[in-house]
Amino acid sequence: MNSPKAPSYGFRPLTHEDMPLLARWLVMPHVAAWWGDKETEMKGIAETIDSVDTEPFIIELDGKPIGYIQSYDPHLDDGENPFQDQPTGTLGIDQFIGEPELVGKGHGTRLIAQFVEMLFEEGAPRVILDPDPANELAVRVYEKVGFRPVRRFKTENGGDALLMAIDNPEDADAE
């Protein structure tokens, strides 16, 4: 019996040409529930295209754009990043699947695991993320990937967030 072909994910750098697609995704109910308002997010994401501290990507499934993912270095943040206590070299990630028909099908777990593995191969000792604890689906996905809760905290706007981390198995120095 032939088993179905495993999905193939790619991460290509975000360009200004991708902004209309991001705008469409950011107003989708499953994205808008957990991300900020579209205009604020669009401005912030556009600034990351030429940023030193953040690397934005379009997630592709078999060559088709399906979502957004970014990695950032909390130690390069000009402001008061709440994660500057993490080991040097730690990278944070934020992401969403934009296409609603692809949510809940296991893509999040697989693509995040693949992205984290890529960051580990590039030398990151730890990868962190900070979901809203009320986003139980996301928290479960991150736990499946291997992230573990580190601490709860209040965000700048007073919301709740859960810092989660996964350590590079090749890096014995990670705390």
Image (cartoon, rainbow, N blue to C red):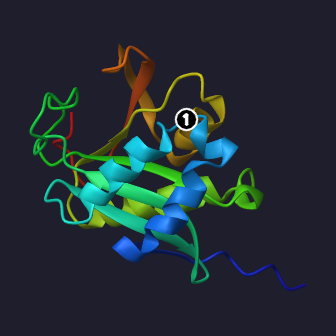
Q: Is residue 133 above or below residue 98?
A: above
The residue lying at 53 percent from left, 41 percent from top is 142
Q: Position of residue 57 (x, y in %)?
A: 39, 66
Query: Dot 1, crowdedness within 10 Å: few (<14), some or many (≥20)?
Result: some
The furthest residue to the right: 1
The furthest residue to the front: 39
From the image, tell me which residue sits under label 1.
34
Q: Is residue 71 above or below residue 156?
A: below
Residue 107 in view = yes
Q: Amino acid at mark 1?
A: Trp
Left or right: residue 172 compared with residue 69: left
**On-image quarter of the N terminus:** bottom right
Left or right: residue 131 compared with residue 5: left
The residue lying at 12 percent from left, 33 percent from top is 79
Left or right: residue 85 compared with residue 103: left
Q: Secondary structure at mark 1?
A: loop
The residue lying at 50 percent from left, 61 percent from top is 22
Q: Is residue 137 above or below residue 62?
A: above
**On-image quarter of the C terminus:** top left
The residue lying at 40 percent from left, 52 percent from top is 42
Label count reads 1
Taking depth in this image into account, of 157 and 129 the one nearest to the observer is: 157
Residue 169 in view = no
Q: Position of residue 10 (x, y in %)?
A: 48, 76
Q: Position of residue 40 (x, y in %)?
A: 38, 42
Q: Is residue 51 above or below residue 16?
A: above
Q: Position of residue 8 (x, y in %)?
A: 59, 78
User: Hey, which quadrant is residue 15 in on the image?
Assistant: bottom left
User: Hey, which quadrant is residue 173 in on the image?
Assistant: top left
User: Hey, which quadrant is residue 174 in on the image?
Assistant: top left
